[in-house]
Image (cartoon, rainbow, N blue to C red):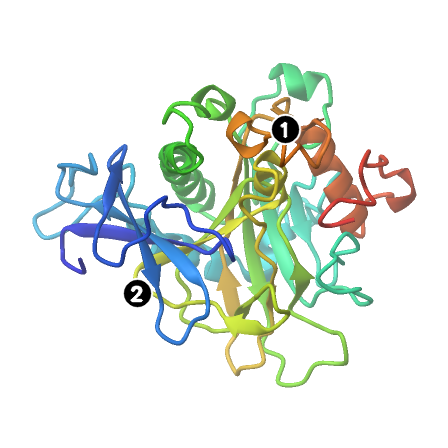
Amino acid sequence: MRSAAIAGAFLACSIGVSLTAQPSNSTLTAVDGLKVGHHTLAERPTGCTVIMVDGDGAAGGVSQRGGAPGTRETDLLNPLNMVDKVNAVVLAGGSAFGLDAATGAVKWLDEHNIGYMSMGGSMFRTSQVQRNKLPSANEAFFLRRERSPNDPDVIANKKLRGLNQWPSDLPGFKETVLRYMSTMEELGRRMVRVYAVALDLPPTYFDAMFEQPTVVQRLTHYPAMPQFEEDEFSIAPHTDSGFMTMLAPNDVPGLSIRLPDGSWIDAPAVEEAYIVNGGDILRRWTNDRFLSTPHRVINAGERPRYAVPYFFDPHPDTSIACLPTCQSAANPAKYPPITHDEYAIWFATRNYEHQNHAAAPELIDASSSPNA
C-alpha cells in the first residue's frame, strides 16, 4: 500500500474503538474515495484505522494539475504536499505571529480565541485525564473560518465567530495558510462520511451539518525543554473538545496518547500520515461508542516542536444529540442534547487564561461530562 499512488495516509486513534465494522489488516473498504482499513501497529496495544487517499486521479478523485514537469501542485485530498509550505511560514513567523509591524501592536488572542496566545496562555481545567495545576509551556497562533466584516455572525458578535487577525509583515502567510485550511476542509467533509458508515448511518448523514463546518487552525510552538517541573507539560493531558483533529506529520517526537488502563504510549508514527484524534463532541454524539483521545506533549528533546493541528467540527448551531444508531433500550443516551457552540464556548472559557473563567456558562451535565 506504500506506493507513489498514495498521496496520504490518515491514522485515526480513537482508543478502544475502530472506524471499521470488520477490521482487517489487508482489506480496505472504499468510502467516498477514501480507502479505509483496520491496522494494528506492532507493539501497540490499540487498534488504529488507516485511511488511504489515492493520488492517481482514480478512486481518490485526486489529480495532479499545473506546475512544471516533475512538480506537483496541491489539490483536494493531497494536503501533505502543503505541510512543508505551512511549516516554512510558521518557522518564518516565529514569535512575530502576534506582532503587527505597522503599529507595533500585538494581535493578542481575543474573545473569539483568534490571534496570538503567549507562552503559558492555556491550562486545561476541564481535563479529567489529570488535575492540571500549571499552564502549558507553548505559544500558538489561532485562526478560524475566514469571515468578512459583513458576515451576519460577525455583525451579531457571536462568540467564537469573529474575524481572523492576520500578521501584516509575513508575505505569503495568509495565502498559504488559507489554502491549507481549504484543502483540509475538503478532506474533512469526506472523512465524516467514513464516520457515518462506521456508525451504521447513510454515508451522507452528516453532510448538511458540515456544509459550513466549524474549523480552527492552530499553529503551535513547543520550545525544547530538557527539564520540566512536576506536573508541567508542553501541553497538558487533555481531550479535544470537537469532532476530530487532524495533526500533520512531525519529525520531532513528544506527542503521547493515554490508554484506557492509564498508561501512556508514544503516538504511532507512520510515514506521510496524519494522526486523527476523536474529540468530546464525537464522544457525546456517539454515546461513548467512539472515545475522545486523551493526549499530551512533552518536548524534552533538543529541538523545538512546531505543530499545525486542524480542528474540524460541525456548524456551531448543530444540535449534538445521541445518534439513532448509538442508543437503545439497553443503552439509553448518556448526555442531554447540547449545541456544538454551547460546548465549545464552555470549553474555551474554562481553559484559556485570557477568558473570564468565572463567566463560563454552566454545562448542563458537567458532573458526568468526560471533561468536567
- The numbered mark at residue 320 is 1
- The numbered mark at residue 278 is none
Callout 1: 10 Å neighbours few (<14), some, many (20+)? many
Mark yes or no: residue 88 visible: no
* In front: label 1 or label 2: 1
- Marks 1/2: CA distance? 34 Å
Q: Residue furthest right?
A: 358
Left or right, residue 148 beside residue 247: right
Q: Residue at x 45, y 64 (%)?
A: 46
- Sequence-earlier tag: 1 or 2: 2
As drawn, 32 above or below 268: above
As drawn, 348 above or below 88: above
Nearest the eye: 125 or 202: 202
Q: Residue at x 39, y 61 (%)?
A: 249
x, y percent for residue 250: 42, 65
The N terminus sits in image quarter: bottom left
Mark yes or no: residue 179 visible: yes
- The numbered mark at residue 271 is 2
Discs 1, 2 touching: Cβ within 8 Å: no
Left or right, residue 300 beside residue 176: right
x, y percent for residue 107: 68, 45
Amino acid at dot 1: Ile
x, y percent for residue 57: 14, 37
As drawn, 247 above or below 298: above
Q: Residue at x 67, y 63 (%)?
A: 237
The secondary structure type at the circle numbered 2 is loop
The secondary structure type at the circle numbered 1 is strand
x, y percent for residue 66: 15, 38
Where residue 191 sits, quadrant-wise, is top left
Amino acid at dot 2: Glu
Nearest the eye: 358 or 1: 1
